[in-house]
Structures are given as structure tokens and as C-alpha cells.
């Protein structure tokens, strides 16, 4: 293939896959057809339209996501639990559960889509989950634990953490089958010094390893919703399409506000109220995610007083740190066209460096299971991704040109893969603000990517490692000899990976390349951080009977990919709360 054709192919790759970063996961599609997955018989799960106008529970968990499902399942062992999820069920939806149809779920722009897109004020396109199981229904499936230092600094009990991880892994974690592309990346990382070879492990260890996956050998996704199989069906109620609008508080005189219930609406817009039963240990737990949890606290009157009053929200507690400390681990990637066919692979191998960067990779050719390039990815007229392109670029002429361009390309133009780097932390932080009073609307969020020089330095070091891997001997079969690394960087730098302006020196300066080609890897966190908004037991400071348990409490993202730790945290805190309550009851206090 001629260089000009390759350059055109590169443009199309990025136009299809990266203009909307959530479709990067389209790379992780399998060409095989998967039959229907066995759906758990959750007799306790139903639409919120069937809910009573008023109901009472020992625990109310807001958000059936990555943390909320294991938390609710654990608490239901001994107590009555209500789990409220604003989205629908992942089961019976092959676009979520079947790897072969994964692209359609991310491409769905309807109001009931499991993926709700947002664009940060930084100009980076992102996505938040809207489905039972949360982000574990939408991500690339990589499963890996947090490191010992992270666990120690979080103040968690190491033995209880390991027990919680194992509880999760029995249902959702698997060992991937590593093939040629991933093997080449692994061996390349080892050749360039990301050592030792740690083989297959869930543990966070310096060096190169094969991590776990939540996709089984048949291509079925297993999500945190599967952890509800542990629930006591007689003590848990899961309501779908239940959008919580605010938390209700009781105050007497000058006493601290105490959470007592929630107001939620069903899919028909009808209002329902759920209250805590009488009892000194009954609680409401917010597990709505890094955007949803601080957003709901604000809508309920807990947040910066000036911002709340600007939206005519009654102030329950002036808490200026709600919505602060928002972070998103920046990701930068390099696309490598391959002269030979490559397998479709998810993220399976990771290089954990000592300078604070994680190197991962993915590959594939048939990203949407279609037979024509016009059926692939974000420009497909069938799946509507083009509607998310900025208006000035969203012309019929641009769409027609893109489709014609893809149709004229040789099928080999779609071969290849990405090697990407994600920095640890990050150190740079931003903030979140309300836009509207509707909890289903996206708030305004700023992450301030690379504001701190150390973050930028780590990105540069990560890219230099990627360059070495591309030039390594094990990776040679997947390289065009006439496409040196500077050419690959230039193709990436000239691709519309975000809405930021481009600079002419992006491919020459790795610092500028980092800034210009920054994307999300969907590991954003913060907004309700420990020590600022919640205490070490995740209780909201300044109020009673309210906790936040999810990724919004993190100061830094755990491990190379956070989902394992978020699921673990739901189980870990559920067990801890049950033990504390048993001790409380044993002291003779009992339940009222």
C-alpha cells in the first residue's frame, strides 16, 4: 500500500474511532457471533413505574453501578435494601453483553442509551454510564487490583480488601487468551526494560503483566450487576429507570441535618418517595459515580452555598468542597497500521513503569461487525455517531466525503492497533458545577489535563516508552518499514481526537503532542473525596445517615484500571457496615 493511501487510512481510523473517544472501544470487538447470554433470574428487579408512592427500607442505595450493586447485595444479607438505578438492565441487550455487538451500545445517542456523553470544559469528549452495572457495562473490560501502597494510604484493612476482591472475582473476572498483537506488545515492553515479566496476575506489580478481563471465553461481558446474584432476594428491591432528584433531610432546631429519604421519578415522570425505617443505624448511600454523586449532593442542598443559591436550591449544608478535586487520567495513544492481519483484542497486557505511566494496547480489524467501511464506527449513518461531531463539522458534505473515503479504501487500511499510555494519579485537578436542576442533565466539569508539570512529564516518558516498543524486535512484524515513529506520531497529531486546537509542532514536541492529543480513558474520579467531603468511613461530613461510596471519593485512580477496586469497595464497605451494625446491636442498642 502506498504511503498516501496509508495516510488516508489513518485519517479514517481516527475519524471513525477517536472523534468521539468513547468509540475507541469499538476496537475491542470480536468478529464472532455470540449466542444469547444466560440472564440471571432477578425476581427483585423491576421498573420503577411499579413502585409504591411511599416505601420504607433500612438502606437506600442511590446508583446501581460498579460500587452500588456489590454494596446493595452485601447489605441485603441482613437488612431491607432499596437500590435505585436511573438506567435500565444490561441483560437481554446484546449490545452490552455480547462483545461482537459492543459498538452499537456506545453509538446509541438516544435518551435511554446506556452511555450518556458529555464534553468537559477542557474540550475532551467523554461518557458516563446510565445502566445497571454502571461503567462495567461499557468499558474495555480490563480487571486489575490496586497496589499495596494505594490500599495502605486509603486506610483499608488489607485482609478484608483481599477477601472482597476474591468475592468479586468469583463472578466477573477471567484470564484472557493472549494472541499475536498483545504478545508482541508484552515482549516489546520487556525488551525495552519494563521488567520483570510477571505473567498473568490481578496484582499491581512493577513490570509487564497480563491482567484479567470481565469478558469470558465466549465473549460475554460480566458486570457488577452480576454481583447481585449474591443478594438476598427477599430483602432487596432493585428499581430501574428510577431517577433520584434529591435527598430529603430532617432537622430539629440547631441539630445536624439527618438524611431520611429520597425523591425519585420513574420513566413516566411520576414522583415517588422512599424513606428510611426508624432505626439509629439506617442510612442512605450515594453511589451515583464521579459526576452523579457530587451532582446529587448539590441538588439536595449540600455544596458551595453561592452556587446552590444561584440555582435557587435551599442550602442544607454549605460544603464548598463538593465538586472539587475532579480528575481524569489523561490518555494518549499512537496508532500503528499493520501490514499483516491482527487479532481483535481488548486491553490485556499492561506495562507498569516506575515513573508513573501505564502502557496498554488494543488491536482489531472488524470493529463493528459490518461488511462495509460505511457500517463501521462513528460515521455510520445507521448508528448516528456523526450527530456528536461539533456542528461546524457536521455538514452533509462532510459525512458524504467521509463515507466515500472509507468506501474507496482497501480493507487492509483498517488493520492495526493502538498502543496507549495513561499516567497514574493524576496530580492535576479541576471542578464540577451544576448546569440545571435536572439530575439527568450533565453538569459542567473541568479536569485541567496536564495543569501540573509532573503529569506532563509522565506523559512524555510514557510516549518515549511507546516509541521504543514500536521499534522493538518483537513488534517488527506489525510495522511498515517505511513508516518510522515520527510519521506515526504525525498521523495521530493531525487526527481530530478532541475539540482542542492543533499546533504545528505537535509531532515534534512530545509535550505538545500530549496536550494536543489528550483523550479520556474513562477513569475520572473525585468530587466527594475522603477527608474533604466524606470521612474515612465514607460518611458525609456535617450530616448524619448519609454516605458516599464510589469513585467520587478517590483522590487518585487505583491501579492501572479502577473497576476492580470500585467493585471491591462496594463489597468491602458493605461487610464493614454489617459488622459495625452487629457490634452495635450486640451492645444492647438494637434496632428501634
Image (spheres, rainbow, N blue to C red):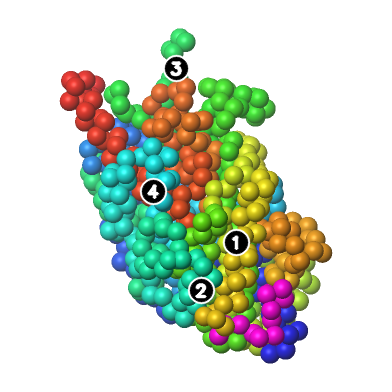
What residue does disc 2 label? 191
Residue 146, percent from left and from top: 41, 51
Q: Judging from the image, what secondary structure is the residue with disc 2 in?
A: helix
Nearer to us of marks 3 and 4 is: 4
Distance CA(mark 2)–CA(mark 1): 15 Å
63, 159: nearer the viewer: 159
First in residue order: circle 3 vs circle 1:
3
What residue does disc 3 label? 256
First in residue order: circle 4 vs circle 1:
4
State if disc 1 and disc 3 touch (CB < 8 Å).
no
Q: Judging from the image, what secondary structure is the residue with disc 3 in?
A: loop
Q: How many C-alpha atoms fall within 10 Å of the one at disc 1: few (<14), some, or many (≥20)? A: many
Distance CA(mark 4)–CA(mark 1): 23 Å
What residue does disc 4 label? 148
Residue 506, percent from left and from top: 76, 63
Distance CA(mark 3)–CA(mark 2): 59 Å
Kindly identify the residue that appears in the image at 48 percent across and 71 percent down.
190
Task: Decide if residue 213 is in sight here.
Answer: no
Distance CA(mark 3)–CA(mark 4): 37 Å
Kindly identify the residue that appears in the image at 23 percent across and 42 percent down.
77
Task: Decide if residue 481 is in sight here.
Answer: yes
290, 479: nearer the viewer: 479
126, 115: nearer the viewer: 126
First in residue order: circle 3 vs circle 2:
2
User: How many marks overall?
Assistant: 4
Nearer to us of marks 2 and 1 is: 2
Identify the magenta region.
Answer: 477-488
Q: Quadrant of the N terminus?
A: bottom right
Distance CA(mark 3)–CA(mark 1): 48 Å
Kindly identify the residue that appears in the image at 55 percent across and 38 percent down.
527
What residue does disc 1 label? 462
Amino acid at each position: 500500500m502506498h504511503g498516501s493511501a496509508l495516510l488516508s487510512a489513518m485519517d479514517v481510523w481516527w475519524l471513525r474511532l477517536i472523534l468521539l473517544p468513547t468509540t475507541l472501544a469499538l476496537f475491542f470487538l470480536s468478529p464472532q457471533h455470540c449466542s444469547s447470554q444466560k440472564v440471571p433470574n432477578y425476581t427483585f428487579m423491576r421498573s420503577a413505574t411499579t413502585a409504591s408512592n411511599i416505601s420504607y427500607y433500612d438502606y437506600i442505595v442511590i446508583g446501581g453501578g460498579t460500587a452500588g450493586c456489590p454494596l446493595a447485595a452485601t447489605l441485603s444479607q441482613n437488612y431491607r435494601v432499596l437500590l435505585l438505578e436511573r438506567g435500565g438492565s444490561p441483560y437481554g441487550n446484546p449490545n452490552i453483553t455480547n462483545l461482537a455487538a459492543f459498538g452499537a451500545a456506545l453509538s446509541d445517542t438516544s435518551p435511554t442509551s446506556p452511555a450518556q456523553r458529555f464534553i468537559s470544559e477542557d474540550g475532551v469528549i467523554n461518557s458516563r454510564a446510565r445502566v445497571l452495572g454502571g461503567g462495567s457495562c461499557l468499558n474495555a473490560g480490563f480487571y486489575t487490583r490496586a497496589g499495596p501502597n494505594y490500599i495502605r494510604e486509603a486506610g483499608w484493612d488489607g485482609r478484608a480488601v483481599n477477601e472482597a476482591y476474591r468475592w468479586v472475582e468469583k463472578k466477573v473476572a477471567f484470564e484472557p487468551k493472549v494472541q499475536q498483537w498483545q504478545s508482541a506488545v508484552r515482549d516489546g515492553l520487556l525488551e525495552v526494560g519494563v521488567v520483570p515479566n510477571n505473567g498473568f496476575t490481578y496484582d499491581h506489580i512493577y513490570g509487564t503483566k497480563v491482567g484479567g478481563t470481565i469478558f469470558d471465553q465466549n465473549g460475554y461481558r460480566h458486570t457488577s450487576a452480576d454481583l447481585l446474584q449474591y443478594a438476598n432476594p427477599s430483602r432487596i428491591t432493585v428499581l430501574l429507570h428510577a431517577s433520584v432528584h434529591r435527598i430529603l433531610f430532617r432537622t430539629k432546631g440547631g441539630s445536624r441535618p439527618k438524611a431520611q429519604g429520597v425523591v425519585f421519578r420513574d420513566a413516566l415522570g411520576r414522583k415517588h418517595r422512599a424513606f428510611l425505617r426508624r432505626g439509629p443505624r439506617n442510612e442512605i448511600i450515594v453511589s451515583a459515580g464521579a459526576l452523579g454523586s457530587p451532582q446529587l449532593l448539590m441538588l439536595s442542598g449540600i455544596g458551595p452555598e453561592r452556587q446552590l443559591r444561584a440555582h435557587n436550591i435551599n442550602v442544607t449544608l454549605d460544603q464548598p468542597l463538593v465538586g472539587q478535586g475532579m480528575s481524569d487520567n489523561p490518555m494518549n495513544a499512537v496508532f500503528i497500521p499493520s501490514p499483516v492481519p491482527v487479532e481483535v483484542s481488548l486491553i490485556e497486557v499492561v506495562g507498569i513503569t516506575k515513573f508513573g505511566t501505564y502502557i496498554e494496547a488494543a488491536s482489531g480489524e472488524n470493529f463493528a461487525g459490518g461488511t462495509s467501511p460505511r457500517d463501521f464506527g462513528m460515521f455510520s449513518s445507521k448508528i448516528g455517531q456523526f450527530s456528536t461531531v461539533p456542528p461546524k463539522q457536521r455538514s452533509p458534505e462532510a459525512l458524504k466525503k467521509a463515507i466515500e473515503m472509507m468506501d474507496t479504501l482497501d480493507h487492509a487500511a483498517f488493520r492495526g492497533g493502538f498502543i496507549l499510555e495513561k499516567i497514574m494519579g493524576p496530580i492535576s485537578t479541576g471542578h464540577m458545577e451544576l448546569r440545571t436542576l435536572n439530575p439527568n442533565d450533565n453538569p459542567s466539569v473541568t479536569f485541567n489535563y496536564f495543569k501540573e508539570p509532573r503529569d506532563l512529564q509522565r506523559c512524555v516518558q510514557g510516549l518515549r516508552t511507546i516509541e521504543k516498543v514500536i521499534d522493538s524486535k518483537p513488534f517488527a512484524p506489525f510495522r511498515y518499514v517505511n513508516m518510522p515513529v515520527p510519521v506515526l506520531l504525525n498521523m495521530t497529531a493531525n487526527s481530530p481526537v478532541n475539540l482542542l486546537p492543533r499546533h504545528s509542532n505537535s509531532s515534534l514536541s512530545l509535550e505538545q503532542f500530549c496536550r494536543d492529543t489528550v483523550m479520556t480513558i474513562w477513569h475520572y474520579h473525585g468530587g466527594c473525596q475522603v477527608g474533604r467531603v466524606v470521612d474515612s468511613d465514607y460518611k458525609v461530613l456535617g450530616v448524619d445517615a448519609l454516605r458516599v461510596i464510589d469513585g467520587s471519593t478517590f483522590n487518585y485512580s487505583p491501579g492501572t484500571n479502577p473497576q476492580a477496586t470500585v467493585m471491591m469497595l462496594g463489597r468491602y464497605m458493605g461487610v464493614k457496615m454489617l459488622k459495625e451494625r452487629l457490634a452495635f446491636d450486640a451492645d444492647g442498642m438494637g434496632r428501634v
